[in-house]
Amino acid sequence: MRFVKFSFVLLILLALFVPALAQEDEKDDRGAGLTIGFSQIGSESAWRTSFTEAVIAEAAERGINLLFSDAQQSQENQIAAIRAWLAQGDVDAIILAPVIESGWDDVLQEAADMGVPVIIVDRNVNADESLYVTRVSSDFVHEGRLAAAWLAQETSGNCNIVELYGTVGSAAAEDRHKGFMDVINLFGNMKIIQSQTGNFVRTEGKQVMASILSSVDPSTICAVFAHNDDMAIGAIEAIKEAGLAPAKDILIVSVDAIPDIFDAMDAGETNATVELSPFMGGPAFDAVVAYLNGEQLPKWIPVGGGLYTSRADYDADR
Ligand code: AHR
């Protein structure tokens, strides 16, 4: 009789706990319950702010516990945040948007040694690919080529160009420049006559453009290629303050496709923008879940974007 009672109790316990234990083994396929550190570059541009907001919203929607760090464009701050998460020992993965390409080997190795997977997002790192799981980002070289191709067509291959450079050493700036040069080098009468960094910041874009307009005969400037829309908007203000008509006296092409650039387009003050999607959080979180479930991932998960010369065209593609 005692054996029967014991078996009955055992059956009840098994019925209660086996399903729970089974559930623990299955990782939620969207990441619910995971703790993920997100090292963000800063808030230097409207696009970066949209990117941050999109990642935070995606984590909340998935039930992911997101640890967020805004590095204020400092690599030192990014590395410190990652080391703090590793020391706490409570992150399941780290997502890194690297401000510049170099200087990541040591901290990525430390994460690898502790078995914490790292997903690179937005920009790129010059590091051994084995030190990160994958990279979710656009093709910055392609973005530069798109901008140059539009300008070549718009000017029949004849244009003196002012380049507003992004953060020197960042993949976004270096590769957009590379792609832009790939195309303009095909045209003997297209050349960059001035190139200065505005660090992707609106006010710096205005300052640099104002300085160039006061040192170069504005009538010799055919166009501005700004590595992001914020610097283009700053340049528009400087061009207007110099008594010139942006998008007419001086053509303007940039990257990001932020709402403000379409306002400028509606006002006839800029010509073209290349889209950069801020929605990289979803693919990054999916990559974390896939990795933790033992799946193999490609080293690059691309996000795309086209070139737009009107809000209507952009909206039509949503
Ligand atoms: O890395 C992407 C670039 O960084 C965006 O084009 C720019 O707006 C941001 O500062």
Image (cartoon, rainbow, N blue to C red):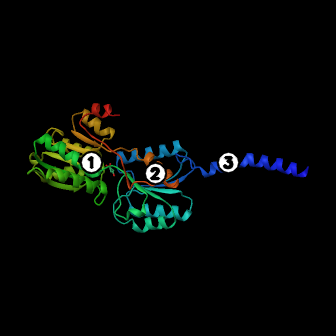
The answer to whether 98 appears left or right of 19 in the picture is left
Q: Check disc 2 and give the amino acid type.
A: Ala
Does the residue tagged 2 have its C-beta within 8 Å of any atom of ligand 1?
A: no
On-image quarter of the C terminus: top left
State which quadrant residue 250 falls in. Answer: top left
The disc label shown at residue 287, or none: 2
Residue 90 screen position, x and y as percent: 57, 59
Rendered image quadrant of residue 46 = top left
Residue at image x 33%, y 38%?
Answer: 259
Mark 1 C-beta closer than 8 Å to ligand 1: no
Q: Is residue 264 above or below residue 120?
A: above
Residue type of the residue flagged with mark 3: Ala
Q: Is mark 2 on a helix, strand or loop?
A: helix
Of residue 310 and residue 296, the one placed in the foreground of this image is 296
Badge 3 or badge 1: first in the primary sequence: 3
Give amino acid for label 1: Met
User: Mark 3 or mark 1, which is nearer to you?
Assistant: 3
- For the residues marked 3 and 1, what is the alpha-carbon distance in whole angstroms? 54 Å
Q: Which residue is drawn at 14% across and 40% down?
A: 154
Residue identifier under label 1: 231
- Name the mark nearer the viewer: 1 or 2: 2
Marks 3 and 2, the one that precedes in the sequence: 3
- Residue at numbered disc 3: 20
